[in-house]
Every structure is written in C-alpha cells, then in structure tokens.
Image (cartoon, rainbow, N blue to C red):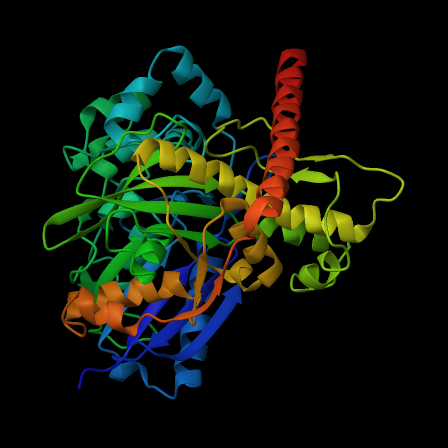
Amino acid sequence: MPGPILAIDQGTTGSTAVVVSPEAEILGRATHEFPQHFPQAGWVEHDLHEIFGSVAAATEEALKAAGVTAGELAALGITNQRETTVLWDRATGHAVHRAIVWQDRRTADLCAAMKADGLEPLYKERAGLVLDPYFSGTKLRWLLDHVDGARRRAEAGELAFGTIDSWLVWRLSGGAAHVTDVSNASRTLLYDLREEAFSDALLEPLGIPRTILPEVRGNAEVYAETRGLGFLPDGIPIAGMAGDQQAALFGQTCFVPGDAKCTYGTGAFLLMNTGEEVVPSQHGLLTTVAWRLGGKTTYALEGSSFIAGAAVQWLRDGLGLIRTAADVERLASEVEDAGEVVFVPALTGLGAPHWDPHARGLIAGLGRDTTASHLARATLEGIALQIVDLAEAMVADAGRDVPRLRVDGGASRNGLLMQFQADMLDVPVDRPENVETTAMGAAYLAGLGAGVFPNTSAIEEAHRIQVTYEPMPGGAGEEARRRKRQLWRDAIRRTRSAATAEESRS
C-alpha cells in the first residue's frame, strides 16, 4: 500500500501542513502563522524566510501528530495564496524584495492608467481578468520598476518570477525546478486562456520579459523531488499543485459543470465549474483555469470578496469587541437580526463584481439602540451578502442556476453565517465533514500525480457531507431576503460614492 501524502497549504496569514492517508483521511494537521508587513497604507508584504519557516514548522508538527515519519510519504502536494508575487535571484534563491501580497493595492494608479489607455478589453478577452491591483502582473511590473537593477537583471536571465507555488517548488527542490501550474498561471494577467500559454500580447504592455517566467504545467504530475531540506528527506515527489481556490473546488469534488463552492477564509471566493468551455464574464466576474488533468483543461467562473474572515479579525483586533474569532457567533446570536445595521466590509476595496480598489468599509443604519451584538451580526451578514452579489452575477454569466452551494474554510464552521447564507441565496448549503478542502484538493492532486488515487471517482467516494443548511421557506423568507438585499444595495452605493468623492478631492 502506498504511504500517506503531505499537503502544504501556504495561506495569507499562516502555513498549514496536513498528512492525508491513501483512504483520504486526515492523520495529522498543524498550522503556523507568520507576520504581516504593512510598509505603507494599502501595502501588504510577506517575508519569504518567515513563510518557509512556517512551512517547515507546520510540516514537522503535522508529521508528529500523524505518527508518520517523513520517509514514509508517498508524495507532496502544494496549494497557495495565489496572486502574491515573488521575484528572486536564480543563483542564490534569495528574494530581491519582500513578496507583494494579493491584498496589496499599490498598483491601483498603474491599473487606472492602463484602463485609460484602453487596455482592459485585451486583458478581459485574453486573460479573463480585469485590470486590478489584485493580480500578479502589475505587482511584477512594480518590482521591475522600483527595485534597483531588477529590470536589467531580469532581462539578463538572472531573476525568476513566480507566485508562491513556484517559489515553494524551487525552494523544496533545491532550485531544480522553476514551474507553475495552469491555475496559478491564469491569475497573473499574463496567461492567455485559449492559447494556454503566456502571451506576448499580455506581457508587452506591462513590460515583462519572458526570461523570468516559469514553465507552465498541469495540476497532477511530478514537477520535482525534495532536495537539501532539513525537515524532509530527499526524493519525495512533488506531484500536485493548484492555487488555493481551485484546490478547494477540486477538494469539494466539483467535477461536473455547474458545481459550485465557496471558501470562507481571509477573503471569500465563489467558483463554478464551467467544464471545457471558456465562459467570458459580462457581469464583473473572472474567467479562470480550474485545473488541467491528462492534458484536458477545465475552466471556472470566479467571484472574489477580498474581506470575509478578515472582517471578524477586525472586530477582534481593531475594535476589541470579541476575544477570539469564534466568539463572533455567540455575540451575534444575542440578537435575532441586525435590524437596519449594514456593514460593507470593503476594508481593502471591493472585489467582484464591483471592482473598486478605492472603496472603503461602511457601517450604516446605526441608532441609539445599536449594540455590539448588532454589529457582530451585521458583520456576518455582510460577508454572506457579498456572496449573494457574486452568485447573481455567476448565474447571469453561466446561464444556469446554482442548485446548491458547497462551503469550506474556517468561517464555514459558523452555523449562524451558513444559515444566513442559505437563507439569502435560497439554496441548500452543504458543509463537508472535512472543511480542510483546500489542503485536501492539493493532497488529491498529488495522489493522482503519484498514483496513490487511481481516478477522480475514488476521490468522490471519500467525500462526505456533515450538515446541510436549508433556506427559510415560504413568504417570510422571501420578504426577509428582499428587505436585506435592498439595505445592502443602498449601502454598496454609498460605499462607492464615498470612494468617488475621495478620488475627486485628491
């Protein structure tokens, strides 16, 4: 029998290692957080030494918890925070600058200038993306323009670019492989979805040389083997890789067109499998690669809300209303409803379908009777109402309903949030027994790549639902949905108009 699989889930605030058995059971798990760096307002950076230290520590702890030695591992899979951008020295492996995180907004002016030059239709058509600071391409342009000597060294072939998946494979293999997978490549602004390759038409407006780009590979194949690490032996095949949201889609076994999942982490991400068809969005969503298996590419529609669980963290760390993130459900349950209070959690701008990088968070409807409980409940409702916006756009783009929603991520354990999500979408919401679906997706892909799992049918058999949240029935449910939606739309308009006024004053 093959040995277990190690899945490394390298996230925005921490790195998680999960040891998965050949029967798709979690044997051990550990998470280690690392610092966030905020050099200026709107800037978010990560130190790669701190990231790798967290990966090593989580791996050692997860193996110990599983009672497994590293030498028993059959394969290693990677999933990662996606658009976070790294530029490093090929000779030393050292980054020339801290990683620029997907939440970072420093390239908002560059994106606005490119839009003014009429370039956004090109990127929408070819890459399936909008011109927003979220994506890697403009972050890479910033690094080439602002790090001393970076452009000259990049053109000379001395530097390598990648998202976190690329850098991790490089680091874990001792520099043997400079690769990415199709799901991460499709988030860079540089990858043509139909050509299935990095495109000169997309590289040239950003001034990015091909010399720094990784090789694009599928999602379940051996990219390299571990080498030169203190916490893992040489020779473990790195055999599966996907961006975190695509990994979660795979981990939720959304293998059929129309299947949809939402992951509630730092942000919230709704994805729908659209099969082998590239579906352009007319309603503010993104078209992206889901995965490529056996040479066959599957695509998806995606909607991203930049702030979800981070809004709860703000209640904890910024306002001090709760001691732990888990306390928010208890506090919010002290009232039956948020009343007129609406919280738009646009703390780092608005993502899909609005795409307003200058938007700021808004709390509306406060009164003398407003309590901390109302604000806690409005926070959970704001997270869910963002997903309703995304789902409506997705249904319009795909031309099909979402019959049910599969959910995962830390905040999916919040029963109050999940029930409200079902009520507002008016569809059942399924939470699996194992909400570590991002890590499980990486483990499944690595298992396929290394031959531990024979096919996707074996993966489907292992996937089990723990609870289904049914929506409110009847007229009362529809009336509540209509009232909440109107309050939300009004708040969104005010959020965006405030941002417009701020821009006009600057």
Please, is residue 117 above or below residue 14 in the view?
above
Q: Residue furthest bottom?
A: 67
Percent position (x, y) of residue 383? 58, 46
Q: What residue is rendered at 30% in x and 63% in y?
A: 442
Q: Residue furthest right?
A: 368
Q: Is residue 207 visible?
A: no
Q: Residue furthest left?
A: 295
Residue 153 placement, left or right of 81: left
Q: Nearer the viewer, residue 44 or 133?
A: 133
Percent position (x, y) of residue 279? 25, 33
Q: How many marks?
A: 0
Q: Which of the 4 image quadrants contains residue 282?
A: top left
Quadrant holding the C terminus: top right
Quadrant holding the N terminus: bottom left
Q: Which of the 4 image quadrants contains residue 42?
A: top right
Percent position (x, y) of residue 342? 69, 38
Q: Nearer the viewer, residue 347 or 392?
A: 392
Percent position (x, y) of residue 43? 56, 37
Q: Nearer the viewer, residue 384 or 448?
A: 384
Q: Is residue 435 visible?
A: yes
Please, is residue 466 above or below residue 491 in the view?
below
Q: Residue furthest front?
A: 475
Q: Nearer the viewer, residue 344 or 3?
A: 344
